[in-house]
Image (cartoon, helix red, strand yellow):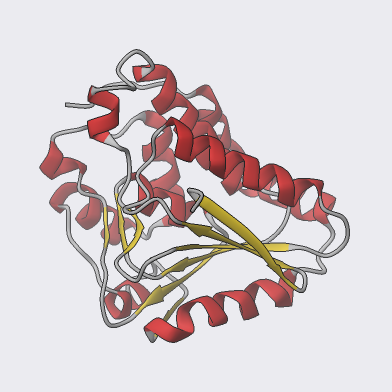
């Protein structure tokens, strides 16, 4: 099974992440970018839904074991590439919906937040920015992304306490747009995406660049700031 599966349901591309905890390492990031390439190269109406291949994980963030081992030589360059991927997803020219069907931690939560809309499982799984507990400060692009997406009090609580927030609470606190039963997360995300798939790509992309230009610039720079993977 490949790290990423991409199928099409009418106008909606459904990207399923199949790499276990779906942690970001070089092969996984390459597979994600290749899937986005395929969506971008498509013609006609389109939208994108991403989800995890198991009920336990959407994405658990950076693969710190890989960064300390096989990926050690890439280090800062790789983390910069992850931020550029998040920026690419945030600025994507077709509508995007994250179907958060399991845990979304750290960079995995940021990936969900980079989408236009989010549907989260209501009964199990947490959205969490746990950098405070793993002792890794956010890089500037990561900070810009979460600041642009989260209400101020929610941002404070998630970043400074590492709070683990379930689907219903995430909906109430403005983190996700909808909480649904496990079996309904992907169907609801596909329905949301399909309703927007006819939007003109050029206009949609231009509007997103206008809304999020400052955040996108910081993500594109890929600066690490105080970030250190311990």
Which residue appears at 77% of the width and 69% of the height?
Answer: 11
State the residue in front, 37 or 196: 37
Residue 105 in sight in this render: yes
Q: Is residue 162 above or below residue 186?
A: above
Question: Position of 68 compared to 108: left or right?
Answer: left
Judge whether residue 215 can be spotted in this image: no
Residue beneath the point at 38% across and 82% down: 182
Tell me if residue 43 comes above or below residue 142 in the rendering.
below
Q: Position of residue 108 (x, y in %)?
A: 37, 50
* Residue located 67% across and 48% down the image: 92
Identity of the residue furthest to the top in this view: 73
* The one of 207 and 186 positioned closer to us in this rendering: 186
Residue 221 image offset from top left, x and y in percent: 52, 23
Q: In the picture, residue 192 is in which quadrant?
A: bottom right
Q: Residue pushed farthest right? A: 44
Q: Is residue 71 left or right of residue 43?
A: left
Q: Residue at x 66, y 71 (%)?
A: 193
The quadrant of the rendering that contains the C terminus is top left
Residue 194, image x, y percentages: 71, 75
User: Relative to residue 126, is residue 60 depicted above or below?
Assistant: above
In the rendered view, would you say 152 is above or below 80? below
The number of numbered discs placed on residues in the rendered structure image is 0
Quadrant in which residue 53 is drawn: bottom left
**Residue in the foreground of this view, choosing between 68 and 99:** 68
Q: Position of residue 226 (x, y in %)?
A: 26, 22
User: Which quadrant of the view contains residue 78?
Assistant: top left
């Amino acid at each position: 099974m490949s790290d990423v599966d991409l199928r099409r349901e009418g106008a909606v591309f459904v990207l399923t992440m199949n790499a276990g905890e779906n942690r970001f390492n070089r092969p996984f990031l390459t597979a994600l970018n290749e899937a986005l390439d395929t969506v971008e190269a498509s013609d006609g109406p389109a939208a994108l839904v991403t989800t995890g291949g198991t009920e336990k994980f959407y994405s658990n963030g950076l693969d710190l074991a890989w960064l300390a081992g096989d990926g050690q030589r890439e280090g800062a360059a790789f983390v910069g590439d992850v931020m550029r991927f998040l920026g690419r997803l945030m600025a994507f020219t077709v509508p995007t919906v994250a179907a958060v069907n399991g845990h979304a931690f750290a960079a995995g939560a940021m990936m969900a937040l980079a989408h236009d809309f989010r549907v989260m499982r209501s009964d199990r799984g947490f959205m969490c920015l746990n950098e405070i507990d793993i002792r890794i400060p956010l890089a500037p692009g990561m900070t810009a992304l979460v600041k642009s997406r989260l209400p101020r009090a929610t941002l404070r609580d998630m970043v400074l306490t590492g709070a683990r927030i379930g689907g219903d609470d995430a909906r109430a606190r403005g983190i996700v747009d909808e909480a649904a039963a496990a079996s309904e997360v992907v169907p609801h995300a596909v329905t949301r995406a399909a309703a927007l798939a006819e939007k003109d790509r050029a206009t949609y992309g231009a509007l997103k660049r206008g809304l999020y230009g400052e955040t996108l610039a910081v993500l594109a720079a890929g600066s690490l700031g105080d970030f250190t993977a311990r």
